[in-house]
Amino acid sequence: MLISVALLGVSCVKDRSTFNTRKITPIVIDTTGLKAQLIQYQFDTLQLMPKVTQEGMDSGRLKYQWTIDAYGGYERVVGTTRRLSTAIIENPDPTPYTLILRVTDTTTNLKSVLTWSLQVISPFGQGLIVADTKDGTTSDANLIMAFNFTSGLPTDSATTRIFQNAYSRANGNQKLDGLVKQVNYMRYNSTKDITFLTDHSFVRINPNSYQLTGKDNDLFVLAPGVIQPNEIQTAIKTNQHQYIINNGKAYGRYGETRQFGYSFLAPDALGYSCQKICGLQDPVYYLKTAGALYDEKNNRFLLLPRMVLMSNPLMSFSPTDFSDPAPAFDPNNMGNKTCLQMIEGYDQRIIAIMKTRDQDQFFVYQIKLTDPLNGKMGIMANDLSNSPEIAQAKFYTCSNAEQVLFYATENHVYATTLELGSPSTTMLRYTTGNGEKITGMKMYTGGGSMYLPNPNAPSDWSQRMVFSSANRLLLLSTYNDATKEGKIIAIPLEILGIGGLVTNPDYIRTYSGFGKITAFSLQSL
Amino acid sequence: MKRLLIALAGIILIAACKKEQIKLYQDTDPSLYFTLTTYSYSFMTDLDSTSRVIYLPVKLSGALKDYDRSFTMQVINDTNTTANKDWYELKQGTLPKNSVNGTIPIVLKRNVTIDTSIIKLKLVLTPSSTLDTMPNATIQLSWTGKIIQPINWNWLRYYFGTPFSTAWYKFIIKTTGRSSFPYSPTLARTDPATWNMTQPQIQAYTLQVKEALQSYNAANPDNPLTHDDGIYKGQLVSMP
């Protein structure tokens, strides 16, 4: 009874326990003007500065933490101040990341949190992949996205983006071991990759991220045993397929097949060994063949199987038919010659630059594949032995828009005509600047545009004309030993038919800031 | 009487507090057993060898020791053994220290009989004073050098050709370094883990074999590869 009375008495005492409670001012993150969904290129810098207030309080009490989070537990702290400024290194992903801002009142531990959806997209679009070296032993890959190489860029002013050291930045600052001698882009629908060749290795990366995806044996269904890369080439226009030559043997892959199968078998017991190959960009579907290679072992050309029949063996050319009109040469018997380069030229002809092995004799042979295959496919042979500096030439290329071969020494670019039935005439078309040496040359075949003078007002820049770059833009890579700088020089082909490179320097574009460029290639969409 | 009952209850309570010794497990009888009941070996995986040591896995039921222990096995001469005693050599097994897993080697030999039949050998672990064996610690061993047509030849024939023979399959094995080509789109529907070879893989092996066959025939123009048995015996080996 007494206890009950006591309890009743206590329960009537006024509760004063909340008198010491202090009202905490909320932290307000003002996102006015900020997007809730952010889209950011990988490697670009993301900058945000939301307005954060806590009425009547000292802002020094507030602590900030920015993180980027993803499904699976990924989290990276990207900032600790109100202003966010961070390079986005997260991989491009269709699933957005979450950017989280946590603001904490360090006195009261009161927190306020705000999140954004952050979609990271690949910055690596259509452009020119440039492989360079700065130390002579390792390589890196860069990407130039510019008016010349990228469709959709309306002008060439202020639109150039160069992703320097894109490979090492995407691969933990590791550079490619060795010097890249060739680089090649392949895409079929959503399957795409870039392959680098050094003297000892194949390296494959994802063009969306530039991250390493495979090396050497990874590229093959069956490990070849010896990795000794020789050549790579892609037919990128239609029915995309790719060829490589490893240790003298040619391999092909078609479409979305990521790995090369077994090497092409020889057509006969003679076997073969090759260094150069040419698959046509747009092989006619009814042809039995998709291109050719040169067999150094037996001094002959061999035909590649159709791209959808990569497991078929190589084919011999039909026995040469010397009846009138006789063909210019016999692809089955080229004599003691080695092949320096094979390129697709005008009218889908296969252009082969050849040298007599023990003499300074140089020739250009043209092969036109026919349906049905016949004995008259060796349609033209040009003797270039007397062409200026041909023995010093290191690089060869041509456009499919004219019957001309460009060859380059360390300092000069020459154009020599290859018209059927006519001897070649050769003209000097370009000379490098002081101290600069040519380290590569290729006719550009990718997307993008270029300017040419208006024939009606050649000196009026305002009346310049826009052309597609493909097969009209000659690319040189140069290196200056004194400045240690490499450049890509893009020279439009102004006059077709004679290899007439533009001479007005206003129309020539230079992309600089590289080390010594050892290889370059288009990167398509 | 009441006091007597209280005293009795007190005594019982005191007695209830007495420390009891828990009986621990005594490993007086550590025992070995084979982890497999059957073991098959084919010389198809090693065509050039005349003998092969294989290691039969055993396990211990019992306490670990900090020293290696050895053991043996013996043959059960019943209908499950067709091997001549000259066709194998029994070796001493080892159970490494601090391990429950051991092996016991046996040398399997090869001769004309073994290349044409499947040899059976039933073995049992031998108990010793330090290592007992579990009941029925036996294993049924079989080995052969005989090559038989794989069950998926109905698919492989599209790549290697319809005719099958020992010489031809030996050539394929020697060229590729593989003794099986688990390519079968039909069997893969129900057992994709076993029948896991892809079409590009079998295609690549086919070209590898075709190249080797061309080289072999070019190097042996007077003695090209022919089928040595089966219904195509004597015919030249050819591929599609």
Image (cartoon, coloured by chain):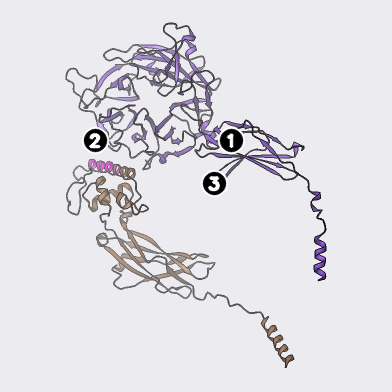
Towards the viewer: A217 or A164: A164
Q: Specify the chain shown as brown.
A: B
Question: Where is residue A297 shown, x and y percent of the image?
Answer: 29, 31
- Residue at mark 1: A36
Q: Secondary structure at mark 2?
A: loop
- Residue at mark 2: A268
Q: Do marks 2 and 1 share a chain?
A: yes
The tag on residue A72 is 3
Question: Where is residue A57 shown, x and y percent of the image?
Answer: 76, 38
Sequence-first tag of 2 and 1? 1
Left-right relation of A328 to B1 = left
User: Are the residues flagged by discs 2 and 3 in contact, CB closer than 8 Å?
Assistant: no
Of circles 2 and 3, which is in front? 3
Q: Main SS of the magenta segment?
A: helix
Say which amino acid is labelled 2: Asp
The tag on residue A444 is none
Which range of residues does the magenta coloring cover?
B207-225
Residue drawn at point x = 80 percent, y = 55 percent: A15
Residue drawn at point x = 70 percent, y = 83 percent: B14
- Chain A: colour as depicted: purple
Specify the quadrant that holds the N terminus of chain B.
bottom right
Regarding residue A298, the answer to whether it shows in the image is: no
Q: Secondary structure at mark 1?
A: loop
User: Are the residues flagged by discs 2 and 1 in contact, CB closer than 8 Å?
Assistant: no
- The image quarter containing residue A284 is top left
Queried whether the magenta region covers residue B214, the answer comes back as: yes
Please state the chain letter of the residue tagged with numbered disc 2 in the rendered image: A
